[in-house]
Image: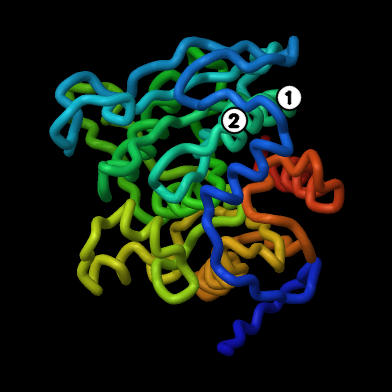
Amino acid sequence: MKRFPLLMTLSAVLLIGSATSLRAADAATNAANGSIHSCEGGTPQTMPSAVHKLDAIALWQPPLPCACSGADANDYPRLTPFLPEVRRSRGAIIVCPGGAYAYRAAHEGVPVAQWVSSLGIAAFVLDYRVSPHHHPEPLRDIQRAIRMVRANASTWGVDPAHVGMMGFSAGGHLVVSAGTMFDAGDPNNADPIERQSCRPDFIVACYPLITLGPYGYEQARYALLGEKPSRELVEYMSLENRIIPQTPPTFIWQTADDAALPVENSLLLARSLRRNKVPFELHIFPHGRHGLALAEDAPDVARWKDLCAAWLKSQGL
């Protein structure tokens, strides 16, 4: 087994789990959490009084860029704001649920945005396009979402210099993709949204899919890249190969015995960040299934929220 020397303190000993279905892991979490609302619509059963949920906003006006034939809910990506009651010029976090690029796991969307908002940070749940849509459509959606938050910063009461992202599993792959593939915007574009930079200011990667190679998840690779992607494309979208010095500061957490997505994904990410001298914080917890999200039924793992909140404060939020 290849070892990855990391000059950091880990919270646990590395354990390798066998690959299982990500959908099964999410189903188990949904069952444990009770009734879960889809991040494609609906109102949560409970909404903290300090959080204001606004109507979803379409990212694109027709025609959609790279839209495949046929119209369904996945053809219309959108952003749903969750704003804290106290409207100050703080930062914003765009939340990207996982789901192996085949669907969006509900428990990693709205509940997470409510928690982020409880910290006094504006949160936005992103319904990005998933299969049958392929790369670069999800990436274009998240880049558009970052630009949209910055373009509307004054309206939503956020600091445009503190716009970050939080992604879970395949959503973690998407937010790290945005942290390695970005531009400063087009100042001459007629659309004021497209004039904004799409570089995130920070990233929170929760049990992220990083590599599309041996430690990756085959179904997610197919959903993102199609049935027969070229070797060059697989390597290009394996994000341990994409980290650059301009990648934003990153917070990472995962469990060592994650049986659906090997913990090597987080270690590969941390190793690449270190090589490029990008600040990061990594936490590996000993035990816990894939797809824990807020980890309400796993108290030891739930500490990631306090650790993350402290890290976000260190980032200026």
Q: Residue at x 57, y 50 (%)?
A: 24
Q: Residue at x 43, y 18 (%)?
A: 152
Horizontal side of 299 relative to 89 (left or right) equals: right
Horizontal side of 4 relative to 191 (left or right) equals: right
* Pick the front one: 307 or 231: 231
> Which residue, given by chain and number where applicable, does mark 1 sit on?
118
Q: Classify 257 as above or below 252.
A: below
Label 2 close to label 1 by CB (< 8 Å): no
- Where residue 141 sits: x, y (%)? 33, 36
Q: In terms of secondary structure, where does tag 2 sit?
A: strand
Where residue 207 sits, quadrant-wise, is bottom right
Q: Residue at x 79, y 70 (%)?
A: 12
Horizontal side of 168 relative to 65 (left or right) equals: right
- Where residue 221 sits: x, y (%)? 35, 60
> Which residue, given by chain and number where applicable, does mark 2 sit on?
91
Could you tell me the amino acid type at mark 1?
Ser
Q: Residues within 10 Å of mark 1 (few under 14, many from 20)?
A: some
- Where residue 290 sits: x, y (%)? 64, 54
* Pick the front one: 101 or 304: 101
Q: Residues within 10 Å of mark 2 (few under 14, many from 20)?
A: many
Q: CA distance from mark 2 to mark 1?
A: 13 Å
Q: Residue furthest right?
A: 299
Q: Classify 3 as above or below 63.
A: below
* Pick the front one: 102 or 202: 102
Visible residue check, residue 299: yes
Visible residue check, residue 270: no
